């Protein structure tokens, strides 16, 4: 049977997993695969596994329980391999890299931040601050505009929105950067203009959170700032 792999830790991790179950229905029984220095938490992989809420939560619970007692390299949901021996071979082959990464993650946690600018508020700001955009808009609304003017206004607004969103994203990251030891960015989706993950050390967590709250208050209702965490450090494995 295939093996589902949850995470990698050092061999001396406490592994307090009593009462925690794996993915599948019925829930898989957790076990460990070890080498001289490392340990992987695994279970039998159920057939036809899909990211159902029950299984995603089970995967997450394993990570959170392990994180409470030390550094962990969390694998993404759905990682499977052929056998325990395949897992053991991977631990041996990449032992140095895994151990180095575990050391770098000791005493850290991940936070994910997304930010979106309310569309109407952003448009009002552009029309207020850009004379060219305001003049084009007034002409169009007054009935003296042309199709080309509407096209020009649309292109101008899009450029101005991108410039403002990028500047704000940079400002948010710069404000938080003193309190993080690593950062990772992904392409924002939907209305978001920023999607960033931050690796935060425990002794900086309070200042990081206080700064994020201050930023959200300063930005007000125009911008929506969403912070998730603490999370397993998926973005930094």
Image (cartoon, grey):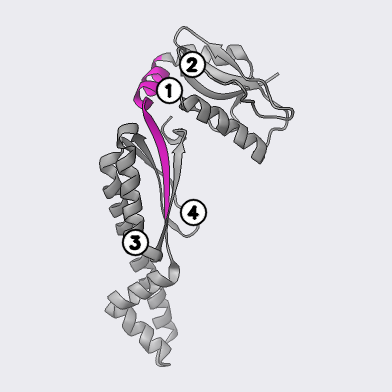
At which x and y percent is residue 225?
41, 55
Residue extending furthest toward the top: 36
Identify residue for label 4. Answer: 189
Q: How crowded is mark 3: few (under 14 residues within 10 Å), some or many (20 or more)?
A: few
Q: Nearer the viewer, mark 4 or mark 3?
A: 3
Whole-Å distance between the Cαs marked 2 and 1? 8 Å
Name the quadrant of the N terminus.
top right
Which mark sits nearer the N-terminus, 4 or 3?
Answer: 4
Q: Is residue 225 left or right of residue 89?
A: left
Marks 4/1 in contact by CB < 8 Å: the verdict is no
Q: Nearer the viewer, mark 2 or mark 3?
A: 2
Identify residue for label 1. Answer: 70
Q: Residues within 10 Å of mark 2 (few under 14, many from 20)?
A: few
What's the residue at 62%, 20% (across, down)?
30
Whole-Å distance between the Cαs marked 4 and 3? 20 Å
Marks 4/3 in contact by CB < 8 Å: the verdict is no
Which mark sits nearer the N-terminus, 2 or 3?
Answer: 2
Whole-Å distance between the Cαs marked 4 and 1? 33 Å
Q: Give the range drawn in magenta.
A: 96-115
Which mark sits nearer the N-terminus, 2 or 1?
Answer: 2
At which x and y percent is residue 120?
43, 72
Q: Nearer the viewer, mark 2 or mark 4?
A: 2
Query: Dot 3 lies on which element?
Result: helix
Which mark sits nearer the N-terminus, 1 or 3?
Answer: 1
Whole-Å distance between the Cαs marked 1 and 3? 36 Å
Identify residue for label 3. Answer: 219
Q: Residues within 10 Å of mark 1 (few under 14, many from 20)?
A: some
Q: How crowded is mark 4: few (under 14 residues within 10 Å), some or many (20 or more)?
A: few
Marks 2/1 in contact by CB < 8 Å: the verdict is yes
Query: Dot 4 lies on which element?
Result: loop
| Mark number, residue 14 | 2
Say if the magenta span includes residue 106. Answer: yes
């Amino acid at each position: 049977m295939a093996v589902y792999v949850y995470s990698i830790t050092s061999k001396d991790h406490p592994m307090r997993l009593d009462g925690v179950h794996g993915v599948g229905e019925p829930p898989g029984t957790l076990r460990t695969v070890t080498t001289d220095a490392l340990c992987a938490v695994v279970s039998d992989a159920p057939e036809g596994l899909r990211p159902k809420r029950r299984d995603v939560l089970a995967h997450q619970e394993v990570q959170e329980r392990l994180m409470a007692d030390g550094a962990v390299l969390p694998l993404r949901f759905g990682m499977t391999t052929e056998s325990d021996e395949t897992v053991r071979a991977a631990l041996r082959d990449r032992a140095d890299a895994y151990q180095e990464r575990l050391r770098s993650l000791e005493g850290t946690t991940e936070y994910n931040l997304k930010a979106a600018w309310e569309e109407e508020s952003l448009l009002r700001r552009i029309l207020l601050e850009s004379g060219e955009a305001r003049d084009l808009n007034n002409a169009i609304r007054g009935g003296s505009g042309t199709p080309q003017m509407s096209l020009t206004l649309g292109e101008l607004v899009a450029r101005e929105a991108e410039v403002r969103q990028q500047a704000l994203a940079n400002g948010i990251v710069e404000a938080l950067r003193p309190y993080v030891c690593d950062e990772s960015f992904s392409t924002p989706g939907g209305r978001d203009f920023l999607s960033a993950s931050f690796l935060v050390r425990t002794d900086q967590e309070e200042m990081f959170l206080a700064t994020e709250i201050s930023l959200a208050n300063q930005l007000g209702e125009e911008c929506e700032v969403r912070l998730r965490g603490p999370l397993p450090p998926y973005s930094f494995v």
